[in-house]
Amino acid sequence: MSARILSGKEFATKIKEAAKEDALAFRDEYGFMPGLAVIIIGEDSASQVYVRNKNKACEELGFHSEMIALPADTSKDELLSRIDALNADKKISGILVQLPLPKALQPFEYDVLNRIDPMKDVDGFHPVNVGRLVTGQESLVPCTPAGCVRMLELADIPIDGANAVIIGRSNIVGKPMMSLLLKKSATVTVCHSHTKNLAEICRNADVLVAAIGKPLFVKADMVKPGATVIDVGINRIEPKKLVGDVDYDSVKEVAGAITPVPGGVGLLTIAMLMANTVKAAKLQAGRI
Ligand code: NAD
């Protein structure tokens, strides 16, 4: 039997509707809509698409939004002073610096991310937010894993007591996903490029998350029948063809539920960014 398709569009719509309702309630109380500032440095074309989509989502929900496009040769000091100005700007609830940074700025990535006020850190990359997440405190959580877990909840897929296996240990996806699933009482295994017996470990998963960056890496024989498979990967294999980290056509015949690529996790990420922007506004207002 073919798997239930977990449509990113369906769940992203629900997350955005809730974020909009929250934002309108915030506006009624404080007199302004939450605002998101996105800083993009350089000309990376994938980043430009992501930033445009973030802007569009703000417009759709009626959020204030500012896009700050800086040239690739922007200095570290100039970038930090832009962040300082946004930290001080009351209209701006959330600040996001689009990654990757241009080569010359990459050695300073942590200086840049750590400069963002933790209460405006809608990407959830600041060490204060990372620490709060790991210790189970209220925090701003990275959008991609937060969106995936919200989708599991909205789809009524059990997490408590489930065996969850995550392939990938990045700071952006794998590690925060581990903390979120642990917080929801899953038994979590994190695999990576040095893991032995990967297929065997994956076959034990009730929830399998692939965040690897390798096209079609997860095959049907790595998946337990009936498992939920979340494909975070976005891999461009031809100029106009995107695939995930999961071999969707074969895995959907074994899995119980699966996210497609495109049309899956990518949409949840942007929806969660909107939810995080409202959450940031409420944090700053002392409402959380
Ligand atoms: P990353 O490169 O930082 O991490 C990849 C991880 O995969 C590493 O921890 C590595 O150990 C592991 N890995 C690599 N080869 C492996 C192997 N053979 N076996 C087991 N593990 C292996 O990547 P990332 O930033 O976490 O992104 C992963 C994928 O998710 C990429 O395709 C990226 O484009 C995509 N992504 C999508 C979204 C979204 O919104 N949908 C957001 C972030 C990332």
Image: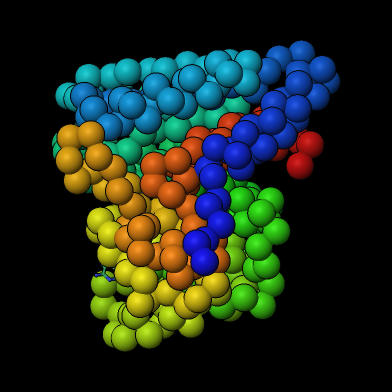
Identify which residue, 132 or 36, lies in the foreground.
36
User: Number of labelled discs?
Assistant: 0
Residue at 53%, 52% in the rendered image: 5
Which quadrant is the C terminus positioned in? top right
* Quarter of the render that holds ligand 1: bottom left
Using the image, determine if residue 136 lies above or below residue 69. Answer: below
Residue at 55%, 37% in the rendered image: 9
Residue farthest along the front direction in this orientation: 1
Q: Is residue 160 visible?
A: yes
In the displayed structure image, the side of residue 186 where residue 127 appears, left or right: left
Identify which residue, 181 or 228, lies in the foreground.
228
Using the image, determine if residue 51 lies above or below residue 286. Answer: above
Residue 263 picture location, percent across and down? 45, 41
Identify which residue, 154 or 86, lies in the foreground.
154
Residue 189 picture location, percent across and down? 47, 77
In the displayed structure image, the side of residue 254 where residue 240 appears, left or right: left
Residue 106 picture location, percent across and down? 23, 42
Identify which residue, 89 or 48, lies in the foreground.
48
Using the image, determine if residue 208 lies above or below residue 260. Answer: below
Q: Is residue 169 visible?
A: no
Residue at 38%, 85% in the rendered image: 200
Q: Quadrant of residue 190?
A: bottom left
The coloring applied to the image is rainbow
Residue at 53%, 71% in the rendered image: 227
Using the image, determine if residue 150 lies above or below residue 120. Answer: below
